[in-house]
């Protein structure tokens, strides 16, 4: 975790520590959605009736504030602890990032020349299995022992090891390619990982990265609330990286861009048959909140980036 006031590679901006309690209020989230929707209307994406409806809905939400309940203070939780607690349900969840991951990564994986591949932040081994099926020798590394335990059972043909994205437990130039999926959002600074990937890769290899984007529009933070195996509830650190952040971290290491793909969020966030229900106690669940402001949620999130995928070739001589 970066110390207080540490400099990140985020355009030279200072990145304060996330090792602190955050306050999440359900009404604040809903009013935030209304504000983004109104800003987009102000820019011309929606008409007068839409703006008037949003203002009326804001008044209604303020009147119903007690139904939404109070805000909740959420302490920090180490990323590994959060994923240890998440491991048991991770593969069975209706996680919209999984099909996006597979759709974007599959063509990139198909283009990889057979070789020795590191699956960095391998989780429960889904991408490791895809690599193995394509004839690669695979090494999976993850910081969560519970995720690794499931990966070892699911993909016995892969060698798995505990390790950190910024201190990979591999020798220099020991792999042909590196794949990292749905994990870089937990790094405040991308530069250390790209440097490590360049260290362990042989020149001419490919670094395939797929990263999720933030739900919290306008913020560089992307906290995820999770429960550790011992029952502690807290937020694990997450960050929204701009496209320039990836390029600044990659180009200095000698990577050249071979492909970049981005998937945008759909126009409809709230399913037509989903109604607003009483909220679950505890930190606000944004998916439970969206039906409370259906049109605002759809308008605020429509067309925003959901995931980004990069195919980067290591060419230190360029």
Image (tube, helix red, strand yellow):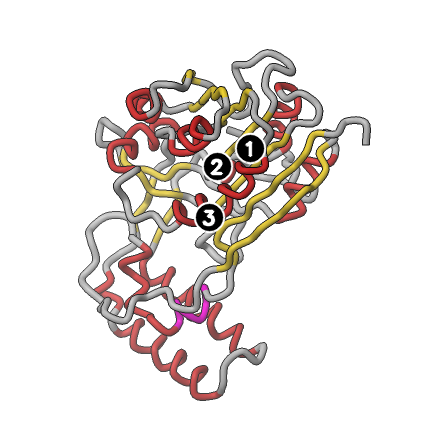
- CB-based contact (under 8 Å), mark 2 and mark 3: no
With respect to residue 151, does 273 lie above or below? below
The residue carrying mark 1 is 4
Q: Of all residues shown, which one is farthest toward the top?
A: 171
- Which residue: 28% across, 44% down? 93
3 or 1: mark nearer the eye = 3
- Sequence-wise, the earlier of marks 1 and 2 is 1
Residue 310 part of the magenta segment: no
Which residue shows up at 42% across the image and 16% down it?
A: 159
2 vs 3, front mark = 3
The residue drawn where x is 63% and y is 40% is: 14
Q: Residues within 10 Å of mark 3 (few under 14, many from 20)?
A: few
Kindly check if marks 1 and 2 are in contact, taking CB atoms under 8 A apart as contact: no
Residue beneath disc 2: 181
x then y, percent, for residue 134? 47, 30
Does label 3 or label 1 sit earlier along the sequence? 1
Q: Which mark is residue 274?
A: none
SS at badge 1? loop
Q: Residue at x 63, y 31 (%)?
A: 206
Prevailing secondary structure class for the magenta stretch in the rendered image: helix
Residue 97 % position (x, y): 41, 47
Q: Position of residue 119 (x, y in %)?
A: 49, 27
């Amino acid at each position: 975790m970066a110390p207080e006031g540490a400099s990140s590679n985020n355009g030279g901006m200072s990145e304060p520590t996330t090792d602190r309690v955050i306050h999440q209020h359900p009404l604040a989230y809903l009013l935030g959605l209304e504000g983004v929707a109104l800003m987009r209307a102000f820019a011309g994406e929606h008409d007068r009736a839409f703006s008037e409806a949003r203002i009326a809905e804001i008044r209604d939400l303020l009147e119903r504030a007690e139904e939404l309940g109070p805000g909740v203070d959420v302490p920090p939780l180490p990323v590994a602890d959060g994923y240890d607690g998440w491991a048991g349900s991770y593969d069975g969840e209706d996680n919209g990032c999984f099909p996006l991951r597979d759709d974007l990564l599959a063509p990139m994986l198909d283009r990889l020349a057979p070789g020795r591949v590191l699956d960095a932040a391998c989780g429960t081994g889904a991408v490791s299995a895809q690599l193995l099926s394509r004839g690669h020798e695979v090494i999976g590394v993850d910081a969560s022992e519970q995720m690794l335990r499931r990966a070892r059972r699911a993909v016995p043909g892969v060698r798995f090891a505990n390790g950190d994205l910024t201190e990979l437990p591999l020798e220099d130039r020991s792999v042909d390619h590196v794949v990292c999926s749905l994990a870089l959002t937990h790094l405040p600074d991308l530069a250390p990982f790209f440097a490590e990937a360049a260290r362990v890769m042989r020149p001419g290899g490919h670094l395939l990265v797929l990263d999720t984007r933030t739900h919290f529009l306008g913020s560089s933070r992307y906290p995820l609330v999770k429960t550790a195996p011992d029952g502690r509830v807290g937020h694990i650190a997450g960050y929204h990286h701009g496209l320039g952040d990836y390029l600044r971290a990659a180009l200095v290491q000698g990577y050249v861009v071979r492909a970049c793909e981005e998937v945008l969020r759909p126009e409809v966030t709230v399913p037509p048959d989903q109604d607003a229900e009483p909220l679950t106690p505890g930190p606000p669940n944004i998916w439970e909140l969206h039906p409370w402001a259906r049109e605002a949620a759809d308008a605020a999130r429509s067309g925003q980036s959901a995931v980004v995928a990069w195919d980067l070739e290591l060419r230190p001589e360029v």
